[in-house]
Image (tube, rainbow, N blue to C red):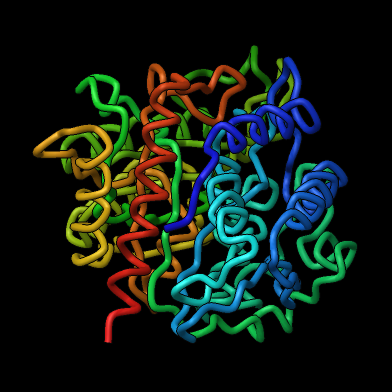
Amino acid sequence: MPSYDWERSLTDLKELADLTGGPEGARRLAWSEDWRTAREWLLKKLEETDASVERDVAGNLWATVPGESEKIVVVGSHIDAVPHGGWLDGCLGVCAALEVLRAHKGETPKVTLKLIDWADEEGARFGRSLLGSSAAAGTLVPDEVRHLKDAQGITLPDALAENGVDLDTMGEAELPEIAAYLELHIEQGPRLEEAGKPAAAVIGCFGVERHSITFTGKASHAGSTPMNLRRDAFLAAARFGLAARESAIERGGVATIGTVTAEPGIPTIINQRCEVTLDQRAFTPEQLKDMLADVKAAADRIADEDGVSVEWKRIWQIDPIPFDSRLVDLAAQAVGEITGDEDPPRLPSGALHDAAEVARRYPTVMVFSSSIDGVSHNPTEDTKEEDLRVALRAYGRLYDLTAGMISEP
């Protein structure tokens, strides 16, 4: 049985936060210099293991320790972060996976063990989440993302090229035959803390519909144009945002207007154009379908009432993804063994994770730790250290249980 030093993982997390964080939060935006610095830090840490390391053509970082069995268990997460993010999002899972590899130094694991640091999980820079994992899972369509630009106008293909990645060959990063994929992550929500629970098994991920919606009206003078004659694109977009909120509440999902760009954006001119991004999420395909139908009907109605036009562009879509039932049971067992809880919690994830892409192809499960106040994607993101220790120990136990199950004849 491997001997884990989870205090070492906590030390790693704090060290990475010192290196690529600060008062304004994490600085590990994918494909940036700070992200590359974090990757170099991880590569140095991997020297403490017996793993061989390689980067695939999608930019994902793999570390492999051959086992007694050729069956593969993958552990990991992502080291990239949103701007001004927290010190745990993503990197908790990478540091936990690192410790699993370190615990096997000098010995041969029962199964072949692979650590993964997925490239650009967040999608914060270009709006397309799970980029590296979707390339490896075979779901990335280059022409659907080729046009994406960041806030500085840099295109996704150019940012990838700066990091030695070619958008058109990313799909060649084929996943190996995986017996199990295990990921540890903070919940990023309030449910565990509200229930007084430190950790949970995750039953699957919400599906997502993400669109860019542009309302186009007519620019006119702010002082001399009567209210009943205005074709205000911003106000149409604002009404649309409220309609999306009402639909999410009614359908039991969530909806977010993430970005708003109004033009010409001058105090004395009615805005002629307003582009917004809409992110809708739900745990069943029916919920997601109904929510999208609701907002499309609302957009048409509002455009007609306000005398503007509306145009939709899909940024991304992923169906709700349930995780493997056997692995969910093992994750719940692991959490229960560590906490003594006879009925450990099982939760869906409203946040997206690379696990959702892997689960399309291979058995997958996640473990959550609690989040203080449910806050994430924020510099104040935090988890009680005692809860982190519980989640880390549960993750280690999940790996042991999974490796034992998979290695059985």
Image position, residue 324 (x, y; %): 25, 67
Which residue is the extreme one toward the left? 342
Position above or below: 404 against 251:
below
Position of 141 with respect to 125 (left or right) is left
Q: Is residue 233 visible?
A: no
- Inspect this view and state whether residue 252 appears: yes
- Closer to the camera, 58 or 306? 58
- Residue at the image point whose x is 44% and y is 74% from the top: 110
Residue 133: which quarter of the image? bottom right
Residue 256 in the figure: left or right of residue 67 = left
In this rendered view, identify the residue nearer to me: 161 or 204: 204
Q: Residue at x 44, y 54 (%)?
A: 183
Point out the image quarter for the C terminus: bottom left
Q: Quadrant of residue 198?
A: top left
Kindly indicate the quadrant of the structure image that contains residue 117.
bottom right
On screen, 224 above or below 180?
above
Q: Is residue 76 placed above or below 173 in the rendered structure? A: above
Q: Position of residue 334 (x, y in %)?
A: 26, 48
Name the residue: 60% across, 45% down.
95
Q: Give the camera-side residue of 304 and 105.
A: 105
- Which image quadrant: the N terminus? bottom left
Please indicate whether residue 382 sits to the left or right of residue 17 in the image.
left
Q: Position of residue 333 (x, y in %)?
A: 20, 50
**Label total for image:** 0
Residue 56: image location, x then y, percent: 72, 76
Residue at 31%, 52% in the rendered image: 206
The residue most toward the top is: 223
- Front-most of 186 and 388? 388
